[in-house]
Image: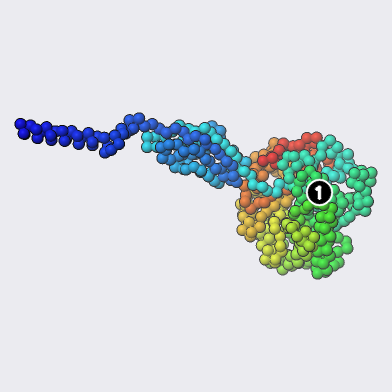
Amino acid sequence: MKIQIKIMAIFILFFSFAIISCSGGGGGTTPPSNTQENPPAPPAVTATAGYKQVKLTWDSVQGATSYNVYWSSSPAVSVATGTAILNVTSPYIHTGLVTGTTYYYILTATNNIGTSGESNVVSTAPIIPQKIVGGVPCDYLAKRIWDVKWKQLDPISTMYANGIGWARVGVLTTSSADLRSTPASNWNTLPWKNEYWSSLEYAEQIMREASNAGMKLNLFFFLSDQAAHGGAQNAPLAWQNLSVDDTAVVLQDYCYQTTKYFKDKGLNIELYDIGNEIERGILNFRPGERVTLPSGIDQMNNMDYMKNNIWNIEAKLLKAAIAGVKQANPNAKIVLHIAALGASNNNIFVNTFFQYMIEQGVAFDYAGLSYPYKSYPLAATVPYFTNNDFLSAISFIGSLGKKIIISEYSYPNSLTGISESPDPGYPYTPSGQEQWLKDFLLFCMNNDNIAGLHYFYPEYYPGMSNGSTPELESTGLFSSDTQIQPAMLKFKL
């Protein structure tokens, strides 16, 4: 009997221990292993655009151990088609993106059982940084007032409405007594004179119309009484026999007086180009003009010659001009604008020009470049903005601590007046111009070294110059004085 009781006690003790062991050691809660499932898809997914990036956020999923992102530039993004970014947490920042491109995203959640279904698709396009996006309007004013053009559409307000937010306007050293003594609203009563073009009063009127339309202003000094550019930099008649030192004195005073004139007229000019395409000197202090060019010297590749004979004089003159501008407008930002891309081996000319000006203490803020025009021979593979020489020059100037403004560029929509072959994939048609401009704008917007760009003479349309400048008519952004070219819409990016 005692043995039976002991056996029974042992049995009861063992049975009790077994129950305790099965219960998990406390609480008495049954594990949910036989009821666990894949997690639900992440809820409340949002995509917020940034500069070259997108920030994704979502609400957490209870029990989820990780999250996966799948992205694509196609709206049909899925786990199967998207590019996977695994094991991320909220918020997740997707970097290295292209502005102007829309990106689409879905998310999944995972736990120790499996993976959820796909979240809703979210999308956004990285923000384009605020850059200088402008044009170089000039001839529309003369055509509207004296040549019965532009009677049905205002080119300035049209450009502004389509995303061209800056006007780059040139001014000669001349002034017109006729324009000065006549209200601009009555200029049409005056007979046309060549002295009007880009005179002080003419430039003032363009900038006033641009400012009234909402545009910001970039003035460039021709530093001449006639159009100055890469091929001609003629000093005003009164300056032609002055020494370098005397030229610096009158140049400083001229830049001061002109800057003060526009400022006193209420025009808020933010950028000032000292000269226009000044890569080989200004005011006739140029190779073969007021400076001797020895036989056999390649001025585009012989940097010692340029430094010791041309740029040393130019640096002194530029300092004087900048001092004059700053005296009248201390907040002015200064641009040095040259046109030599593709003209020297590995763009050594462009690179050395800006490096030398920095070494000489020329206080400029932006390096201005003319993009090689299609009406002139190109010394580089096209499309030029994909050429390594161009990309290297942009990178080198950026390494000097200077941002770049493409001060002039354009692309044809017609063969008229254009002798060069089109870039591959960009025919000289309205649609070809549109695609080229879109791709070039996106390139500039996504290059951190480029601060902005100005389209050259955007106001032109076929017939505006009566055929006298067909290359300008072919590269304009209007198809008539009532219609824009499709390319104009690309600035709304």
Residue at figure coordinates x 73%, y 51% from the top left: 407
Indicate the position of residue 253 as horizontal and vertical percent values. Answer: 83, 63
Residue at figure coordinates x 76%, y 46% from the top left: 215
Residue at figure coordinates x 84%, y 60% from the top left: 257
Indicate the position of residue 99 as horizontal and vertical percent values. Answer: 61, 43
Using the image, determine if residue 406 lies above or below residue 465.
below
Tell me if mark 1 has few (under 14), some (14-19) or many (20+) residues whose alpha carbon lies within 10 angstroms of its own: many
* Colour convention: rainbow
Between 22 and 125, the one nearer to me in the picture: 22
Between 135 and 41, the one nearer to me in the picture: 41
- Residue 113 lies in what quarter of the image? top left
Between 96 and 246, the one nearer to me in the picture: 96
Q: What element carries label 1?
A: helix
- Residue 363 lies in what quarter of the image? bottom right
Residue named by callout 1: 207
Residue 315 in view (yes/no):
yes
Quarter of the image for the C terminus: give it. top right
Using the image, determine if residue 181 lies above or below residue 115.
below
Quarter of the image for the N terminus: give it. top left
